[in-house]
Structures are given as C-alpha cells and as structure tokens.
C-alpha cells in the first residue's frame, strides 16, 4: 500500500485542480545550485535572453561555478556570485534587456499603468513589463529574478550573476539582462552571507562568503536525482481568475478595501513537488479550527489567526497548494 504524506499551504486563490493548469519544468532550462544551506532551483528563459541563458548553461555544464562564491551581497537588494575577477576569459554577452513583442507569446496582463511600465503581466510564469506602443516586452526585477552582472557598457556581462533577494529594484528593468528566476529555494538564497554595507556588500574574506558547492543542469542528471516539480500555468484560466481576485480584495478581513491595483512582483506562482497527474492541487473542505490554524489564507499578514471562526460549526472551503510530498 502506498501512503502519501502531504504538507499543505493554504492560499486564498482559485483552485488549480486541472492538470492543464500546471506545467512541468524543462530539464534543459533547470539549474540546481547547491549551497551549504540547501538547494536553489533556477528556471532559465531562452525566449527573452537566449544568448545569456546559453552561456550560463554552458558554464554550468563546464563546472565553472563549482566552488565559487557570492562575493557581493547587499541586504534587501541582491546576492552576486561568480569568480569576482576583473578580467574574464569568457566572451562578452550582448545586452538582452528586452525583446520585440509577438502575438505568439503566452501573455496574461496583470496591471495597466504600472509605475515602471505601461503594463505588466506574465509570460510562461515570468513577470514582465510591456510597452505596447513600442512593441517591446521585458523581464522584471522581482524578488527571485536571476540576472547577469555587467560594467557600465551594456554588452559587458560575462559570467557573474545575481539573485534579487530584497524588494523589487524595478528601476533596473531594461538595464540588465534578466535570464532566469528562482522557482524553489528562496529561503536558501535569503540565508546567503551578507557583506558589509560600508563596502557596498563586498566580502573580501573568502572564508566568510557563501559558496556554490555545485551547479548542475537537470538534463545532465539521472531522473532519480532530479526534483520533479510542477508550476502553475500562468496562461490558464485559473491563474487569470487568481489575478482578478487579488486585484479585487473582497475578503471580510479588509475593512478598508485596497485600491484595485496589482503589483506584478506580489503575485506568487504556485508549485507542486509532485506531478499534477499524480496529486493535483485541489479544493478541500477543512474544519473551522483547521482554518484558524495552518490553513488561514496565507495572503493575509496576521500576527496570529483569529481565536474563533465566525461560524465554528460550519465547514469552510479554501484552496490549498501542495508544497511538499513524500511517498513510502
């Protein structure tokens, strides 16, 4: 008999019960960064930064990052890693700050009139900005974005990359090449050793830096060493419904309704560590006292859940996303 243990995180979102509302990570676009504190899983984006993603993929396959470190880490900003050398032996990369618009892109609009773009939305799970008049679209610097560091010249990036670990520095959009995003392990990224503020985050002592023990492409690993993962399909109707619900906060918690605006960097993209065909995220019935505990909607920043449910004898219907699974 197979016993499945599920740990659930409840979200105030629409249910993602249909297999078509999920997508699998492509092993050729999935990089595992192993640090002492755990694993960071990165999804590469060839549609927006094909040359940068290709060079990063090659460097990973060559073992270039193994043993290197995060040498410039600014709290609330970015963690920058690589060889820290002033002169790189690898070719400079062309700037891939934006790309031309195409109707073939799986674009879902999030907000019109964003502070940093005429419009924001999502394409294949990545948050983007868009200028419809100029027919340009670009990846945004949301938390978890992975981008290539460079000097003042736009085509000066080579090997060193950074992960956004603080509030979204959106002023960097269209000024650096974003080529991926963290899909798992942001808690690990947040534990990367910070550098001194007075030194612009530079950690001179190599022994004090967080080190990359290994970097591997999922496609190069045997299947039993990969991390099976499903991500919410941002082109699905369920995700579009989620955007609408987050834009229009109707929960009774809100006594002063927030404006009907949506920050593209504050929309979580759910994931499941099990194939959707095996265990779908589904709408479940939970007792009121469960709702008051682990299943209180995660989008409400309460110091603690309420002591009593308004209707303790009733069942409350909430949406729960599978965040871990083990089979024995």
Image: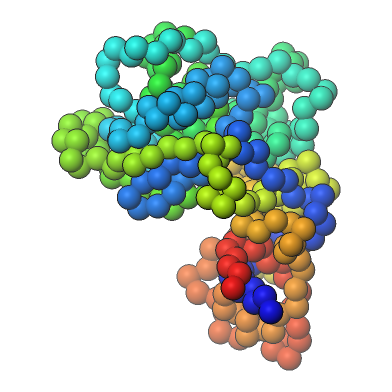
Q: Quadrant of residue 64?
A: top left
Residue 277, percent from left and from top: 77, 58
| Residue positioned 61% across, 33% down in the render | 28
| Residue positioned 43% across, 10% down in the render | 91
Q: Indicate whether 13 appears above or below 259.
A: below
Total numbered circles: 0
Query: Is residue 254 among the parts visible in the rendering?
Result: no
Residue 289, percent from left and from top: 63, 85
Q: Quadrant of residue 293?
A: bottom right
Q: Left or right of 4: which side holds 77?
A: left
| Residue positioned 79% across, 60% down in the render | 17
What quarter of the picture does the N terminus occupy? bottom right
What quarter of the picture does the C terminus occupy? bottom right
Q: Indicate whether 156 appears above or below 261.
A: above
Query: Is residue 53 among the parts visible in the rendering?
Result: yes
Residue 93, percent from left and from top: 48, 12
Viewer-proximal residue, 13 or 189?
189
Q: Quadrant of residue 8?
A: bottom right
| Residue positioned 74% across, 62% down in the render | 278
Q: Indicate whether 319 appears above or below 40.
A: below
Q: What coloring was used for the rendering?
A: rainbow
Residue 297, percent from left and from top: 63, 67
Viewer-proximal residue, 111 or 216?
216
Q: Which residue is outermost to the front?
A: 222
């Amino acid at each position: 008999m197979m016993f499945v243990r599920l740990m659930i995180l409840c979200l105030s979102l629409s249910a993602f019960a249909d297999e078509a509302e999920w997508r699998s990570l492509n092993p050729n676009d999935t990089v595992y960064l192993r640090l002492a504190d755990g694993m960071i899983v990165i999804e590469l984006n060839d549609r927006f930064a094909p040359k940068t993603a290709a060079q990063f993929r090659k460097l990973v396959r060559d073992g270039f990052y193994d043993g290197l470190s995060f040498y410039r880490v600014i709290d609330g900003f970015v963690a920058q890693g690589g060889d820290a050398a002033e002169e790189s032996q690898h070719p400079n990369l062309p700037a891939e700050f934006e790309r031309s618009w195409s109707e073939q892109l799986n674009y879902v609009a999030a907000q019109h009139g964003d502070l940093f773009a005429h419009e924001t939305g999502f394409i294949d799970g990545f948050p983007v900005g868009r200028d419809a008049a100029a027919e340009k679209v670009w990846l945004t610097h949301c938390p978890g974005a992975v981008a290539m560091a460079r000097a003042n010249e736009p085509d000066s990036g080579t090997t060193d990359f950074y992960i956004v670990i603080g509030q979204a520095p959106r002023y960097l959009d269209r000024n650096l090449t974003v080529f991926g995003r963290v899909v798992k392990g942001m808690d690990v990224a947040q534990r990367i050793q910070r550098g001194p503020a007075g030194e612009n985050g530079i950690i001179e002592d190599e022994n004090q830096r967080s080190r990359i023990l290994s970097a591997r492409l999922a496609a190069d690993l045997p299947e039993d060493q990969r991390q099976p993962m499903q991500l919410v399909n941002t082109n699905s109707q369920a995700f579009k419904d989620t955007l609408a619900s987050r834009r229009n906060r109707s929960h009774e918690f809100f006594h002063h309704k927030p404006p009907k605006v949506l920050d593209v960097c504050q929309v979580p993209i759910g994931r499941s560590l099990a194939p959707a065909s095996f265990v779908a995220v589904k709408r479940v019935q939970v007792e009121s006292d469960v709702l008051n505990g682990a299943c209180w909607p995660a989008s409400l920043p309460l110091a603690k859940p309420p002591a009593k449910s308004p209707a303790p004898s009733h069942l409350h219907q909430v949406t729960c996303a599978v965040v871990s699974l083990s089979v024995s």
